[in-house]
């Protein structure tokens, strides 16, 4: 297994890079989760998002990846985007590879939940009405 991929990035995210970080000939399943900026939240139209990360966010992201990998024994990877995003942009790409699909799905779900709960990244939603609000502060 190669170096663990756990990164915060202002660049567009490429799911193929995250997939490649975990894939291998011993794995029959690679689950890749993509978190996509949607056009609504709570019944309101969203026009754009801005993500900001604490300076230590990448360390927290790495810790989530290491914890899920250690518990499951599987390779994991995740990249979270920061900056200005528009509808349809990828905000998070997480991947887990396993010999079989069930364990890959379970570990990927665990990884995404850990990232959402523990990585200090905040999102400002821009609503079509002109109002904005921070989420996760």
Image (tube, rainbow, N blue to C red):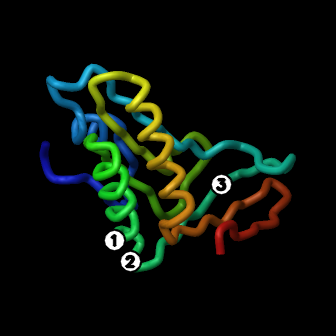
Residue behind mark 2? 56
Callout 2 crowding tier (Cα within 10 Å): few <14, some 14–19, many ≥20: few
Residue depicted at x 39% and y 31%: 103
Q: Secondary structure at mark 1?
A: helix
Task: Mark 3 and mark 2 in contact? Answer it, CB < 8 Å.
Answer: no
Q: First in sequence, mark 3 or 1: give its number.
A: 3
Please identify, in this view, whether the residue under mark 3 or under mark 2 is nearer the observer.
2
Residue depicted at x 46% and y 77%: 54
Instruction: Report the Cα–Cα distance between label 3 and label 2.
Output: 25 Å
Where residue 9 is drawn, which disc sits there?
none
| x and y percentages locating residue 36 in the rendered image | 56, 42
Callout 3 crowding tier (Cα within 10 Å): few <14, some 14–19, many ≥20: many
Callout 1 crowding tier (Cα within 10 Å): few <14, some 14–19, many ≥20: some
| x and y percentages locating residue 127 in the rendered image | 78, 57
Task: Mark 1 and mark 2 in contact? Answer it, CB < 8 Å.
Answer: yes
Residue behind mark 1? 59
Residue depicted at x 41% and y 71%: 57
Q: First in sequence, mark 3 or 2: give its number.
A: 3
Instruction: Report the Cα–Cα distance between label 3 and label 1.
Output: 27 Å
Where residue 48 is drawn, which disc sits there?
3
Between residues 63 and 14, which one lies in front from this camera angle? Answer: 63
> Picture quarter containing residue 40?
top right
Q: Is residue 106 left or right of residue 131?
A: left
Where the N terminus falls, by quadrant? top left
Where the C terminus falls, by quadrant? bottom right
> Picture quarter containing residue 80?
bottom left
Please identify, in this view, whether the residue under mark 3 or under mark 1 is nearer the observer.
1
Q: Is residue 10 above or below residue 15?
A: below
How many circles with numbers are drawn on the protein?
3
């Amino acid at each position: 297994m190669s170096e663990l991929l756990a990164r915060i990035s202002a660049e567009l995210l490429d799911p193929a890079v995250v997939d490649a970080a975990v894939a291998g000939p011993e794995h029959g399943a690679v689950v890749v989760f993509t978190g996509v900026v949607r056009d609504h939240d709570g019944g309101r139209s969203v026009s754009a998002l801005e993500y900001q990360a604490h300076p230590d966010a990448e360390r927290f992201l790495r810790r989530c990846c290491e914890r899920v990998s250690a518990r499951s024994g599987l390779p994991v990877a995740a990249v979270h985007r920061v900056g200005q995003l528009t509808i349809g942009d990828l905000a998070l790409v997480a991947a887990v590879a396993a010999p079989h699909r069930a364990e890959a799905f379970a570990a990927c779900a665990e990884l995404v939940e850990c990232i959402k709960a523990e990585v200090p990244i905040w999102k400002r939603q821009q609503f079509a009405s002109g109002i904005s609000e921070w989420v996760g502060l």
